[in-house]
Amino acid sequence: MLTYICWMYERKILPYLNCGLDLVGEVLYGKWKLRILWFIHEGHKRPSELQRKIPDVSRRVLNIQLKELESHELVSRKIYPVMPPKVEYKLTDFGRTLIPVIQAIGLWGDKYEEKLKEVIIKQFPEATLTP
Amino acid sequence: MLTYICWMYERKILPYLNCGLDLVGEVLYGKWKLRILWFIHEGHKRPSELQRKIPDVSRRVLNIQLKELESHELVSRKIYPVMPPKVEYKLTDFGRTLIPVIQAIGLWGDKYEEKLKEVIIKQFPEATLTP
DNA sequence: GACAATAGGGATAAATTTCTCCCTATTTGA
DNA sequence: TCAAATAGGGAGAAATTTATCCCTATTGTC
């Protein structure tokens, strides 16, 4: 049986908060979160913009991950009382401290792009991936 | 119906390989992988040592994530033909290039430990977490 | 009037990851 | 002889995350 607290799944396994890596995992462990943060940092503030930047994420999940980032105080959400509705996200001061870290991760991925593609793709049967 | 290729789940949704962050996600997106890499880097080479360093991971999952890291060529596995069995992991040259990135992540987590604990813990009902 | 764009949620299914339990095999030590 | 340590896998369940489908509401445009 699934139970939810508001929009959030009620976890049965409590988080581990032993070291810095644990803590980071709690706030960044989500399939799209790093990219969401990065695109917000790049100035794509509105949900619809973010969705266009990351077309693979469904709108539903994008909303949920944004809510989590907001609840972790990495981003803030501003609502404009206009119609049609307008919402803008931006990084908080706290969220901004994460940018150099995300950048380091992305740069490593860019630097070793070829190697990474090689080791990732070799796990898939032929013809399932078209580079 | 679940199907597995050897030890690995046969994915139905293919990976996204658009940018560096996607690529990194493919090899580091696992609950324990960053810590596994970090402890190997610190010199804890044997599976049993790693399990003692990370008691929260089950032995089964530790093995699986080690296999994935090996298949992604971030670590290498050396078997000593002795009894009882002895296995040692170490970082590959490629894996070593990741250490500064993991360190940056961990340092950020350490630096903002208090803030992170605060925003994480506030999502849990009272008395479920004992700091 | 029909339709797109805007933001977002409910319900539910599917995918994926992680966990639990149990089993193999060998050597050392009590 | 029995237990512990070593490395590791199978089967299946549970937990968690992500995806899909559909709905609300308003304004502007064709």
Image (cartoon, coloured by chain):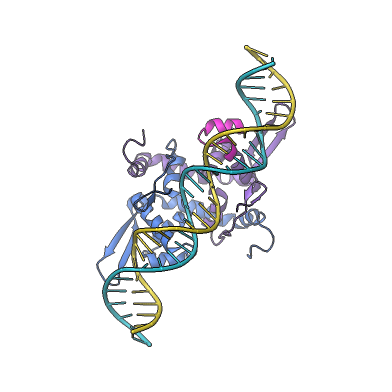
Chain colours: A blue, B purple, C yellow, D cyan
- Examine the rendered structure and indicate whether residue D30 appears above or below residue B88: below
Residue B131 visible to the viewer: no
Front one among A43 and D4? D4
Residue B18 position, x and y percent, is 55, 62
Front one among A90 and D3? D3
Residue B63 horizontal side relative to residue A103, left or right: right
Residue B82 position, x and y percent, is 73, 28
Residue A64 visible to the viewer: yes
How many numbered marks are there? 0
Residue A76 position, x and y percent, is 32, 56
- Examine the rendered structure and indicate whether residue B48 appears above or below residue B13: above
Residue at horizontal 36%, vertical 37%? B128
Residue A119 horizontal side relative to residue A46, left or right: right
Residue B60 forms part of the magenta stretch: yes
Front one among B12 and A127? B12
Q: Main secondary structure of the magenta part?
A: helix
Residue at horizontal 55%, vertical 60%? B16
Q: Which residues are magenta?
A: B46-61
Residue D3 position, x and y percent, is 61, 19
Residue A111 forms part of the magenta stretch: no
Q: Quadrant where the C terminus of chain A lies?
A: bottom right
- Examine the rendered structure and indicate whether residue B102 appears above or below residue B86: below
Residue at horizontal 50%, vertical 35%? B56
